[in-house]
């Protein structure tokens, strides 16, 4: 019979451990099936056998995980099972749209379902722990990791966090809220650089999605590589200790991001591994991922009196509790099935639906879409046309390009009566000439352009986030034919291509749509899906506008046309190319003004707000209704807009509906200049509209009374 599980067994294990075995439980090695950072563990098997490691990342599959688990369980002295971790972020084997794309569906039910699929596939491959969701608020398109997260808005990111944690953990694996916190504010959009964040931007912008993850029961948290105001997150006793564990009561495991503990030496806050280990352990970091500081420095730190046995024991207890919570102490072989995870009809159907719901119709200058009736011939040009790998995007788990559907394949299947000719059109004149010949002969022209999967994600910041030069040359040459051109943009970030929006007939943002991207794009082009996704980030005209977000505060001289001495550029507008929440449809939706059920409200109350919506056709479709608020006069300057809720509504052509929001008045509060949260009496303006474009918002006024 299995020993009594829970705390008693954990205490018995703790008591039986040698100091070296305790330290071993705080060490995570990396395997070599994926490379997600510098360095690969040598002698992983020996270290597991000697009880010098308690977890491994980047190893998956029934056979490999079982073989290593057997060493831990049958050959080590205390037989403590290993934790296998992996970055199953937007899919494990069936790849879903990149988070920046899926966030644009504004659909918590979808996010939960795709996370549950990801967790189930990972578990079938022996993974007990996914390092997801990534919850970094990102407002600077130069930062390559924007692709991995839910965009610029804290409310949207918090909804995303809840759904992803619930979905992943519903599959019986542990989720990880990462990278705690403020990584997306990395200076100048350069990865691993410093962040300068005010207490207010921490509290109101960057912390909310992590708090939502903790409230949803996330089992682990990963600190960011970066530092805020000179304090590396991996050693941040205030944010990890006082806020995460203290104020929020997080009792789970904190795992370093890769070699971040060792990197405290590079940060210049530790002289050696012992000091680095002491700083991280004191901040509450339980597991050293891939680094050497815990393995080489923790015993030394103990000997120097920099840490105590009790501190080490507290971390080991949390790690053993996680293993017990995942059922590993009862059944070390519970994860992993022979054959592992293979995409099937159900997973592909979900991936196709998620991808369709994540594609944004950015511009539709000429009425060319949908391509219905289908054209007799179609030229599909550009380097992204035939690439299935690039549709998977970065951090694509064990996604396999040969199991993914390229744009060319998907379009050929859906437009099965259309003569389709595909050409890359790059890198040289010969390729360009061939592409132009195809374009001249075809009835419809589609350009597939953008970023390869290596051009975003970690360590992939871009100072000039436009199209690669050879793709720009192809696009300009095709546009010079003066024929209607539909452009498909594959990318992990907005691309600054204003000239393309000015001249293309239509542009769709595909982001990285995943395994079923080709089918999903074809469904949208054919009108089988009326595009419904919106932007989860502002789309700048130019990198010079970065960082940019809709929730800026007015300042003392807000922009005023014609007035030089106001906040403006000499050479660009302030407004983005497309605002947060932007996305067109094949139908015309009309939103009315918000109607609050009463004008006077009090702290602690809830207020119903309704918004009429009508679909003027020509076809059924789904739109989103955004509810913002603004506090025009308060004890501190408040943002011009704050997102309070978004409702999706599907309507047949000609149909109308009334969307109902339930607004908790306390959500209209904020942290005063004294650091104390408050709900202040006074006027509040409510806005309803299709995006954060203030010119399209309809207003209602309520009043908070004492
Ligand atoms: C990487 C990433 C992190 C990931 C980890 C393990 O450096 O920053 O997001 O979970 O290493 O692959």
Image (cartoon, rainbow, N blue to C red):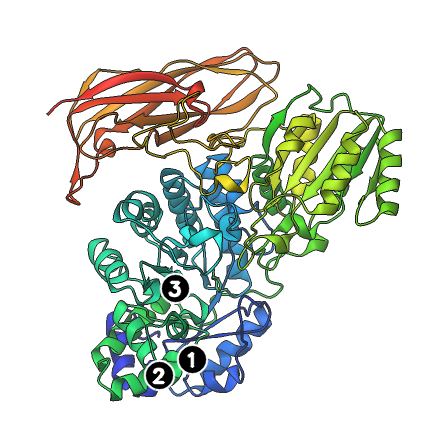
Which residue is disc 3 drawn over?
A: 326
Q: 10 Å neighbourhood of mark 2: few (<14), some, or many (≥20)?
A: many
Q: Quadrant of the C terminus?
A: top left
User: In this rendering, is residue 664 above or below 92?
Assistant: above
* Residue pointed to by mark 2: 297
Q: State whether residue 405 appears in this view.
A: no
Residue shown at 37% from the left, 69% from the top? 323
Most foreground residue, 376 or 266: 266
- At numbered mark 2, what does the secondary structure look like: helix, strand or loop? helix
The foreground one among 87 and 259 is 259
Image: 651 above or below 123: above
Q: What whole-number distance in Å separates the C-alpha atoms at marks 1 and 2?
A: 7 Å
Residue drawn where x is 24% and y is 80% of the image: 307
Distance in Å between CA atoms under marks 2 and 3: 29 Å
Q: Secondary structure at mark 3?
A: loop
Residue at position x 31%, y 20% in the image: 609
Residue toward you, 679 or 481? 481
**Left or right: residue 518 compared with residue 89:** right
In the shown orientation, is residue 451 left or right of residue 260? Answer: right
The answer, for residue 16, to whether it is visible in the render is yes
Q: Quadrant of residue 408?
A: top right
User: Residue 45's x, y, as percent?
Assistant: 52, 83
Marks 1 and 2 in Cβ contact (< 8 Å): yes
Whole-Å distance between the Cαs marked 1 and 3?
Answer: 26 Å
**Element under disc 1:** loop
Of mark 1 and mark 2, the one earlier in the sequence is 1
Label 1 crowd bin: few (<14), some (14–19), many (20+), radius 10 Å: many
């Amino acid at each position: 019979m299995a020993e009594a599980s829970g705390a008693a067994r954990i205490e018995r294990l703790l008591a039986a451990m040698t100091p070296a075995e305790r330290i071993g439980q705080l060490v995570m090695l990396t395997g070599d099936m994926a490379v997600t950072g510098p360095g690969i563990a040598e002698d992983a098997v020996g270290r597991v056998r000697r009880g010098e490691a308690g977890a491994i990342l980047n190893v998956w599959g029934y056979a490999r995980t079982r073989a290593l688990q057997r060493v831990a369980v049958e050959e080590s002295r205390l037989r403590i099972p290993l934790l296998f971790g992996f970055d199953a972020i937007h899919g494990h084997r069936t790849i879903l749209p990149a988070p920046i794309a899926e966030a644009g569906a504004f659909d918590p039910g979808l996010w939960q379902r795709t996370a549950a699929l990801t967790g189930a596939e990972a578990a079938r491959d022996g993974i007990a722990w996914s390092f997801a969701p990534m919850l970094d608020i990102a407002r600077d398109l130069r930062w390559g990791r924007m692709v991995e997260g839910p965009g610029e808005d804290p409310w949207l990111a918090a909804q995303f966090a809840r759904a992803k944690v619930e979905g992943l953990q519903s599959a019986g694996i542990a989720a990880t809220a990462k990278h705690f916190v403020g990584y997306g504010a990395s200076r100048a959009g350069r990865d691993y650089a410093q962040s300068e964040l005010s207490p207010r931007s921490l509290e109101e912008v960057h912390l909310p999605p992590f708090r939502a993850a903790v409230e949803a029961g996330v089992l682990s948290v990963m600190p960011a590589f970066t530092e805020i105001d000179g304090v590396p997150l991996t050693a941040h006793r205030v944010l990890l200790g006082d806020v995460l564990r203290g104020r929020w009561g997080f009792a789970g495991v904190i795992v370093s991001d890769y070699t971040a503990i060792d990197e405290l030496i590079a940060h210049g806050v530790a002289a050696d591994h012992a000091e680095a280990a002491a700083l991280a352990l004191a901040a509450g970091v339980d597991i050293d991922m891939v680094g050497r500081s815990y393995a080489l420095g923790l015993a030394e730190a103990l000997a120097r009196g920099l840490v105590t046995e009790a501190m080490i024991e507290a971390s080991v207890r949390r790690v053993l509790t996680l293993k017990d919570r995942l059922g590993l102490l009862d059944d070390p072989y519970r994860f992993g099935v022979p054959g592992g995870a293979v995409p099937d009809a159900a997973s592909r159907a979900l991936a196709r639906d998620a991808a369709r719901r994540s594609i944004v119709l950015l511009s539709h200058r000429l009425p060319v879409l949908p391509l219905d009736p289908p054209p007799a011939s179609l030229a599909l040009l550009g380097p992204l046309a035939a690439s299935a790998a690039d549709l998977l995007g970065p951090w694509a788990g064990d996604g396999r390009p040969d199991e993914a559907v390229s744009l060319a394949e998907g379009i050929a299947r859906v437009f099965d009566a259309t003569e389709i000719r595909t050409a890359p059109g790059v890198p040289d004149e010969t390729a360009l000439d061939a592409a132009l010949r195809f374009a001249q002969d075809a009835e419809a022209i589609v350009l597939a352009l953008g970023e390869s999967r290596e051009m975003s994600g970690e360590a992939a910041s871009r100072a000039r986030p436009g199209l690669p030069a050879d793709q720009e040359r192809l696009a300009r040459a095709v546009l010079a034919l003066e024929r209607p051109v539909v452009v498909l943009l594959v990318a992990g970030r907005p691309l600054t291509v204003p000239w393309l929006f000015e001249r293309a007939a239509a542009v769709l943002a595909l982001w990285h749509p995943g395994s079923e991207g080709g089918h999903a794009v074809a469904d949208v082009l054919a009108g089988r899906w009326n595009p419904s996704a919106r932007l989860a980030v502002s789309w700048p005209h130019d990198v010079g506008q970065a960082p940019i977000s809709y929730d800026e505060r007015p300042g003392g001289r807000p922009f005023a046309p014609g007035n030089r001495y106001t906040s403006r550029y000499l050479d660009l507008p302030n407004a983005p190319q497309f605002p947060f929440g932007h996305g067109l449809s094949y139908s015309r939706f009309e939103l009315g003004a918000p109607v609050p059920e009463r004008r006077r409200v009090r702290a602690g109350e809830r207020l119903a707000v309704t918004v009429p919506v009508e679909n003027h056709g020509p076809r059924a479709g789904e739109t989103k209704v955004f509810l913002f608020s603004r506090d025009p006069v308060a004890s501190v300057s408040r943002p011009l807009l704050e997102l309070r809720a978004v409702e999706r509504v599907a309507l047949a052509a000609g149909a109308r509906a009334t969307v109902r929001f339930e607004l908790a008045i306390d959500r209209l509060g904020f942290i005063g200049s004294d650091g104390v949260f408050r709900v202040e009496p006074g006027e509040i303006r409510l806005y309803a509209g299709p995006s954060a474009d203030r010119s399209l918002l309809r207003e209602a006024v309520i009043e908070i009374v004492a």
